[in-house]
Structure formats: structure tokens, C-alpha cells
Amino acid sequence: MADKTVSMYATGRTNQVLTVDGPPAGLQWILYQWSVETSPFEAGASVVVRRNGRLITSTSSGGRASAQGPPAFLFSPGDQFTVTWDGVTSGDELIFSFMYREQQYGELPDGYGVV
């Protein structure tokens, strides 16, 4: 299983959007766990995670939370995750990490139900 971390620095207090694009053509990722973090910790921070515009999860726990399956999420070429923070301070580091298994496009996943 592999992991990936993507981060950015806040440029304001609201609507700070981090975008994660899908894998390269011919591959798909099965995401089993992800986490969000705000550094330094912001007690009033909230985070919303979406896949292709549809809500996956949200938290208002100060920008530190994680979620794990089942179900796992299929992430294919052309898909996009957006992670939106509100209630942060300019200069905060906004971090999205996830654990995934990479496989050939079209291969059936095993273990978890996948959405």
C-alpha cells in the first residue's frame, strides 16, 4: 500500500481549496484512508472533502481528522478530489494525506466495498 501527501499554504481565512487530480491514464487508485490537518492547529477550522463535486466527508474538529473504509473510494483518471478549508489563518499549512493501492484501470478491487 502506498501513501501520498499533498499540501498548500493558506492565503486567507476562507475557501482555501486544495485539488488532487486522479492517477495517470491506465491506472486507478483505491483509497482506503485519508486525513486532513491544519498546521498549526486551528480550533475553529472546518474541512470539506469532495470527489468530483460530491460530498465525501467533512469535519469541524479544528482541521485534524481522518476517515477510513469501508467503503473505499475508486479514484480513476479524470477524477478529482477537492479539500476545502475554512477558519484558517493566512500562512497555515493545509495538509491532505491518503493511503491507497494502485492497480491497472478496470481491474476489480478486493477486500472492501468500493464506491
Image: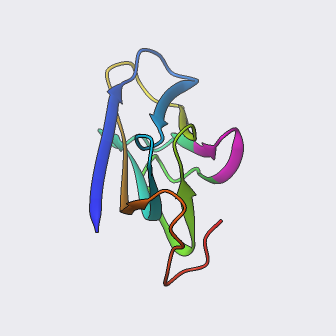
| Image-quadrant location for residue 10 | top left
Main secondary-structure element of the magenta-colored stretch: strand
Q: Is residue 51 magenta?
A: yes
**Residue at x 46% of width, y 62% of height:** 31
**Does 110 sit above or below residue 101?**
below
Q: Could you say where residue 92 lies in the image, as x and y percent from the top left?
A: 33, 28
Q: Is residue 114 left or right of residue 66?
A: right
Choose between 72 and 97: the one closer to the eye. 72
Q: Residue furthest right?
A: 54
Choose between 78 and 39: the one closer to the eye. 78
**Does 93 sit above or below residue 38?**
above
Q: Could you say where residue 57 lies in the image, as x and y percent from the top left?
A: 63, 55
Q: Residue furthest top?
A: 11
| Image-quadrant location for residue 96 | top left
**Residue at x 43% of width, y 58% of height:** 34
**Residue at x 61% of width, y 71% of height:** 114
Choose between 3 and 93: the one closer to the eye. 3
Q: Could you say where residue 8 lies in the image, as x and y percent from the top left?
A: 34, 27
Choose between 3 and 41: the one closer to the eye. 3
The residue range painted magenta reads 48-56
Q: Is residue 8 magenta?
A: no
In which quadrant will I find the N terminus? bottom left
**Does 55 sit above or below residue 109?**
above
In which quadrant will I find the C terminus? bottom right
**Residue at x 52% of width, y 27% of height:** 17
